[in-house]
Image (cartoon, grey):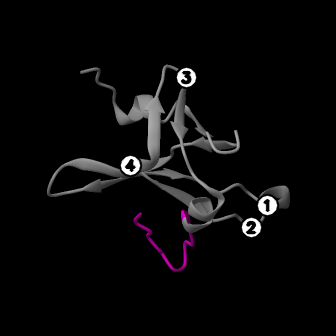
Amino acid sequence: MKRCSTADLRHLEIINLCDGARLGYACDFEFDKEDARILALVVPGSSGFLGLGREDDLIIPWHLIECIGEDTILVKLSQQELSCCSCSEKKKRRFHF
């Protein structure tokens, strides 16, 4: 078993295999406190014009990760799953697939 830290994961670019889109880098993680497992990666939303406004964070459930490589994390998100993974800061929605 190869181990890595959450600090290591933050330096890996996340790529969607369905369309080749670069989703960004994980800024945070959701954990299950009882099982001590990572449930999801959190990718920050991009800033708007001149840093004003911000898009919703992207919450990627752990089971949608296909591969963690040396330089990237490959995920498989369909367009529907991608729109469901967006999390509004105001509503704090969480989606589980």
User: Which label belongs to residue 53?
Assistant: 2
In front of the other: 56 or 39: 39
Circle 3 Cα neighbour tier, 10 Å, few/some/many (<14 / 14–19 / ≥20): few
User: Which label belongs to residue 63?
Assistant: 4
| Residue range (magenta) | 85-97
Gap in angstroms between the C-alphas marked 3 and 4: 19 Å
Q: Residue at the spot x=56%, y=61% of the render?
A: 81
Circle 1 sits in a helix, a strand or a loop, which is it?
Answer: loop
User: Which label belongs to residue 71?
Assistant: 3
Gap in angstroms between the C-alphas marked 4 and 1: 30 Å
Q: Which residue lies furthest to the right in this view?
A: 49
Residue 46 rendering spot, x and y as whole percentages:
70, 54
For the residues carrying marks 3 and 1, which lies nearer the camera in this image?
3
Q: Which amino acid does label 1 sit on?
A: Gly
| Mark 3 or 1, nearer chain start | 1
For the residues carrying marks 4 and 1, which lies nearer the camera in this image?
4
Check whether the beta carbons of the residues at disc 3 and disc 4 lie within 8 A of each other.
no
- Compared to residue 54, the image places residue 68 above or below, namely above
**Which residue is denoted by mark 1 in the rendering?**
48
Check whether the beta carbons of the residues at disc 2 and disc 1 lie within 8 A of each other.
yes
Circle 4 sits in a helix, a strand or a loop, which is it?
Answer: helix
Dividing the picture into quadrants, the one containing residue 23 is: top right
Image position of 15 (left or right of 33): right
| Mark 2 or 3, nearer chain start | 2
Check whether the beta carbons of the residues at disc 3 and disc 1 lie within 8 A of each other.
no
- Compared to residue 47, the image places residue 26 above or below, namely above
The secondary structure that dominates the magenta segment is loop
Q: What residue type is labelled 3?
A: Asp
Quarter placement of the N terminus: top left
